[in-house]
Amino acid sequence: MRFVATFAFALTAVLTAAPALAQGTPDSAVVGTKQFEMKELTNGLEGPWEITWGPDGWLWVTERTGGKITRVNPADGTKQVAIDIEEVSAPGGQDGLLGMALDPGLLKGTGNDYVYASYTYVDKTRGGIPWVADPFSPYHDLWVKIVRLTYDEATGTLKDPVDIIAGMPAKNDHNSGRLKFGPDAKLYYTIGDGGKGQLGNWCIPIEAQRLPTADEMANKNWMAYQGKTLRLNLDGSIPDDNPELDGVKSHVLTYGHRNAQGIDFGPDGTLYASEQGPKTDDEVNVLVAGENYGWPRVAGFKDDMAYQYARWDLATTPCEQLTFSDITIDPSVPVEDETSWPGEQHDPLATLFTVPNDWNFQDPACGGIDFICWPTVAASSMQAYFPAAGEGIPGWENSLLVTTLKRGSIYRIPLAEDGKTVSGPIERYFQSENRLRDMALSPDMKTMYIATDVSGLVGTMDGGAGTVLKNPGAILVYTYTGEGDGTAAAATTEAAPSAEAAATAATGAPVTFTAEQAARGKTAYDANCVSCHGPDLISANYGPPLAGAYFDGKWIGQTAAALYTHTHDRMPPSRPGQLGDQTYADLVAYILQVNGLAAGDTELPPDVAALETMVISR
């Protein structure tokens, strides 16, 4: 039983959806007809995660791995660091400095010159995260907090951090981490399910359906907040009008979420969210206080289409003895159809995308990286687009804009005037070899500022998969110029020179390896490494990431011998050095390839002396 409190704003409306308009593969999206001019405003950002337009007329950006909040001048790309938070810890691919919300009173003379930010940090006094047994894991003592910072206009800096809430569980996957200031002067925050039940976490039960207990609230134990959206007072306390769930009032606003990386409010107070699905069914939701959104019992709609809930943690064969697969579920693992769940869920407004059970999830066109071609698009942020009459982009009134990682695109979901139902086909814009992380709008709502990931796997323009991003760690500017010819082509300008290209190259012969050797390395990696370091080498689960900013900072400029020795002498943890010297050389070749180094004509040898003469550089 649950009691849903009555809020004094629009979140309590009883809503309906138009699911039929959201079904189909990504190819079912209509190509948009608006024309935009594109340019790169700036680059060199260390994992930009949140971008928002500030009251000072600058863009405010959180740098996930850099631990900085940076202000960027939209006129010329000039960057000014407002604060470098040394406490930020970012050992993996989805942690670090994440969400940011600007107080509406910032620079308005109200005295509320505050900025709120969330990040992961290390605290060894809490006894460790319960599901991380290894005390040497970088995630054993990793937690999440939200802080309030004070802006000093005279110096352009943020200072005086005050903890609003601390000790929330951090994970090696699916931290979500979007933060929004609500029209009711409350903070809204998303926390993912931690990537449990998959990859290196496949034996850990998903807790998105578990609700907080009275004892946990009394002891400020926030462990049940996984897979939830939260609503907090500005001092971190629990609002009196939050929903009471199973007899307990907590920060929890909604539950049953997988990885909600986007939230935004419409002008009437409706709260929209985007959420990443498993193999199918990225979701676009309207969040209603106290409601259950189904995960992991349901992905998307309760339709039994291309999803079953696999209980790896309840396998009759000990889970640790099994090999995780998204495609082939071991017979000893109990599975449940969506329609077998008797619980009630709040249906999504739309899915991106839903496919039938006979969908080919092992498409050879993906170059062995099947999930890039799955019908999910990796929804990474949500922007409610409701310009005033006569303003903004014509025809885009009453829309939701969703940025995506896998295909470097923006999807527009048109809404009816009530803002509660889909009113037409979903449109797609700007396919690119970039991972689009977040969006900010100009005040006239005719220009979109897009933050891009530093690294990661992306769908290529020819339909395959790749690791080389066109504009890594950048802010891209898309300005509306008029109606187009249906291709939604962007006039791409010359990219600004990257910090990487400007760096002085290390001395020594460059590393060489063949494509065949890297392919062998991938086979060895998938068999021995993927469960800990993630399928993209960035979304690490137990070990550090092997690609992206972490790799650049640790290995670029080092010798190949250093990386080979590190890999050979430590991996796999249960039997280091047991894979064979040539296999370790192959693994190094694959790691280098994923990090953007091109294959050549000479294999990387397993000879440490020879490797000392080869330098990892770009």
Image (cartoon, helix red, strand yellow):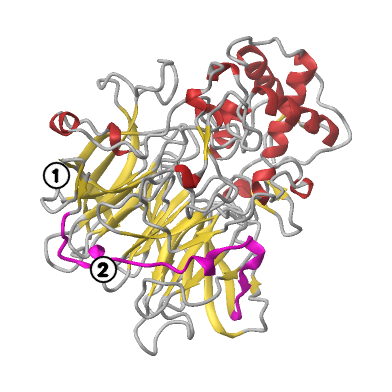
Q: In the image, residue 513 lies at what x, y percent? A: 81, 31
The quadrant in which the C terminus is found is top right
Label placed on residue 269: 2
Q: Judge whether residue 404 is colored magenta.
A: no
Q: In the image, residue 584 lies at what x, y percent? A: 73, 19
For badge 2, the amino acid type reads: Gly
Q: Would you place residue 151 above or below residue 615 in this image?
A: below
> What is the secondary structure assignment of the residue under circle 1?
loop
Q: In the image, residue 231 lies at what x, y percent? A: 23, 51
Q: Would you place residue 35 above or below residue 12 in this image?
A: below
Q: Earlier in the sequence, mark 1 or mark 2?
A: 1
In this figure, which residue is indicated by the disc labeled 1? Answer: 237
Q: Nearer the viewer, residue 296 or 282?
A: 296
Q: Nearer the viewer, residue 245 or 406?
A: 245
> What is the secondary structure assignment of the residue under circle 2?
loop
Q: CA distance from mark 1 to mark 2?
A: 21 Å
Q: Which residues are magenta?
A: 5-34
Q: In the image, residue 248 lies at what x, y percent? A: 16, 40
Kindly give the residue lying farthest to the bottom in the view shown.
Answer: 390
Left/right of residue 337 with respect to residue 443 in the rendered view = right
Q: Would you place residue 334 above or below residue 23 in this image?
A: above
Q: Nearer the viewer, residue 251 or 515?
A: 251
Quarter residue 214 falls in: top left
Quarter residue 142 falls in: top left
For label 1, the crowd category at 10 Å Cα-Cα, with few meaning under 14, some 14 to 19 and many 20 or more, is few
Would residue 64 be seen by someone viewing this image from the given angle? yes
